[in-house]
Amino acid sequence: MAGSNAKIDWITVLLFILLVGFGWGNIYSASLTDEFTSIFDINQVYGKQSIRILMSIVLIVLILSIQAKFYERFASIIYILSLLSLLGLYVFGKEISGATSWYDLGVANLQPSEFAKAATALALAKYVSDLQVNIFEFKHQLRALLIIGLPVVFIAPQPDPGSAIVFLSLLIPLYREGLSKYYINTGLVAVAVFVITLIISPLYTSILAVLIAVVYFYLKKEQRSLWLIVATILAIAFFIFFLENEQYYLSAIILGLVIVYTVLSIKQKNVLPKILMLLFLVISFSFSGDYIFENVFAQRHRDRFNIVLGKQVDNQGIGYNTAQSEIAIGSGGWTGKGWTQGTQTKGKFVPEQHTDYIFSTVGEEWGFLGSSLVIVLFTLLLLRIYMISERQKSQFNRVYGYGVLSILFIHFSINIGMVLGIFPTVGIPLPFFSYGGSALWGFTILLFILVKLDSKRMFYE
């Protein structure tokens, strides 16, 4: 049981309550029917969510009642069990919306990837905080990356690229603990090259990279200023623009700036080996990324990427959700149409409006001010988690705290971007807001394990 010395961070608890409460209110509005019975009516979406919120309270009490040492001592076992639950989907999983990511328990469906996030964060914290582990050594870095990568390997083929992306955010705690910028920079290059390859061909991406690298190396060798280097890259981009089109122009700028940033972050006089390595990575990522996009991603995922990148327009088909979401948010104006008064919401124009697209309900009914309030609440929660993580004396606690921060941040940013049409629709729920038991319970477990660890920070060493 929680001891008398426990000190709960009530600011975090309050932010959790506000987000869950505001989320339920919008789920209620998005799923309201003409006949209201009870907020606990299990035949209604809002009734089911009410029951799930009550179960979350039970989870919170259970999490806070367990000794803090338990989460560190049994982190590896929890992680292994979560991996087994992910593997089990290939045999016993139920397909929903094109992804075999669920277990059918009869009374409800359970998505194990939501619980695997907390399990992976615990396992990573357990490994990094081990006295025998030196994160500066390559073999230990590789093992840490393996802990993060295994869930990705199990989840991505379901296919569920959204959940797979979330696990990659756990690289951030490693960076906080001293992992070389090389990995972060490599990730930035990979993401930039992947997106650019979707706009232009892998061949043109590789040619651009070689051209920019040659010019950069010459100017660096001649000790030219950074501004001149950037100006040269922009000149190359404009040149390509006049020869080809606007997409090539933007791609050259993005790729050039990423390469410049990456090379400048390396404190070495001899940059030629690093430039050659970058070129190898860019060319490898461009062709492998194109292969993955065409052969691993489902057609619906490819279509969503193409819509966001402007290569495809389909407001009546695969792009319908995003188009209607933008209409709903835009129609809200400054103050919104009022709770339960949204015409787009009541008309059910936005599919999945109570789940992944719940923020469109906020935008329509609460307007810019209400949407800003939600963003502020999430920002405050993220800042609070950052503060909690930094004040931990235990490395296990700190690494886990950064894991929580990373997972919530990637969910929040991608979901909002997805609803606004900035990111493709990848099925990532808004934490504590979106309808669904697995997501709500998974986020609750994730957050309140940190609350428990923090409550014992003066005694748990």
Image (spheres, grey):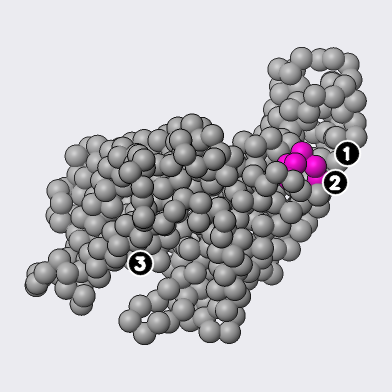
Point out the image quarter for the N terminus. bottom left
Name which residue type carries label 1.
Leu
Q: Do the CB atoms of the residues marked 1 and 2 lie less than 8 Å apart? A: yes
> Is residue 125 among what the camera can see?
yes
- Magenta residues, dominant SS class: loop
- Where residue 123 appears, as percent x and y from the top left, is 60, 55
Residue hosting label 3:
437
Could you say which quadrant of the image residue 368 lies in?
Answer: top left
Disc number at residue 280? 2
From the image, state whether disc 2 or disc 3 is nearer to you. Answer: 3
In space, the residues marked 1 and 2 are separated at their CA atoms by: 6 Å
Residue for point 54% across, 34% down = 393
Dot 1 crowding, Cα within 10 Å, few <14, some 14–19, many 20+ = some
- Where residue 387 appears, as percent x and y from the top left, is 45, 32
Name which residue type carries label 3.
Gly
Residue hosting label 1:
276
User: Residues in magenta?
Assistant: 133-138
Among the two numbered marks 2 and 3 on one chain, the one whose residue lies closer to the N terminus? 2
Badge 1 element = helix
